[in-house]
Amino acid sequence: MPLVNETSNFDKTYVMSEYLWKFFDPGKMRNIISDMKNMIVESEVEFDAIACRGVSGLLIASPLCVAMNRPLIIVRKGISGTHSSARVEGYLPSELRYVIVDDFIETGTTVYTIIRRIREQYKNSKPHRMSARCVGLFLCEASYHYDDYNDLSYGNFFRKHIHGPMIGLE
C-alpha cells in the first residue's frame, strides 16, 4: 500500500498518509471519538487529563478532551521548528492521573516516551512533591492483545508504569 493516498470524496481531494485516512472523514472521526469516549467511560478509570504525542495522537486526543471535558497534555516529538521550548505542555497539577490515547502501538516507543517525558517533567519541577501517574492506555486500533506485551520492546516498562487498563477498539 502506498504511504500517501489521493482519494476523492464529496468532490474534495484528500492527500494523506495511509494510516491517517479515517481521521480526515468527519463521520468516521465522530464515530472514533464516540467509541473512544465510551471505552474510557466503561473502563471506570479515574483520571485528570488525556496525554498524547504526535499528529495522530493529537487528532484523537484533542476532540476527545472536548467530548470528555478533560484537559490535554501534549508531549512533543521535538522542539525544533516549533513555537515552544517545552517538551511537555498542558495540564500539569501537583498530583496528576492521566490516560494516554493514540491510534495504535507498533513498537511502544510513543507510549514509552510520553510516560518518560511526563515523569521527567515532574521530577524536575519544584516543589518536588509533584507526582504523575499513568492510569490507562486507550487505542483506536487493537493492534495487540494487551494481556501479552512480550512482543513489544517496552513490555516490562508498560507493566510497571501503566497502572490501569490497556485497551484498544476492536
Image: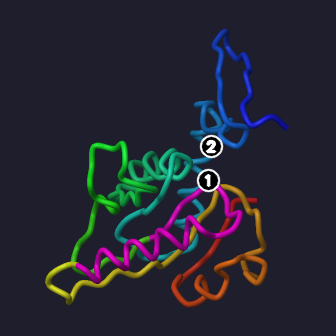
Is residue 116 magenta-colored? yes
The foreground one among 132 and 108 is 108
Asked if the residue at tag 2 contacts the one at tag 1, i.e. Cβ–Cβ closer than 8 Å, the answer is: yes
Q: How packed is label 1: few (under 14 Cα within 10 Å), some, or many (20 or more)?
A: some
The residue where tag 2 is placed is 31
Residue at 47%, 68% in the rendered image = 114
For the point 35% across and 80% down, which residue is it?
Answer: 132
The N terminus, quarter of image: top right
Residue matched to label 1: 35
Tell me where residue 144 appears, x and y as whole percent: 77, 69
Q: Is residue 49 above or below residue 159?
A: above
Query: Looking at the rendering, which quadrant does residue 46 occupy?
Result: bottom left
76, above or below 122, in the image: above
Say whether residue 164 is left or right of residue 67: right
Magenta stretch: residue 170 in it? no
The part of the chain drawn in magenta is: 99-124
Q: Marks 1 and 2, how far apart in space?
A: 6 Å
Dividing the picture into quarters, in which one does residue 142 lie? bottom right
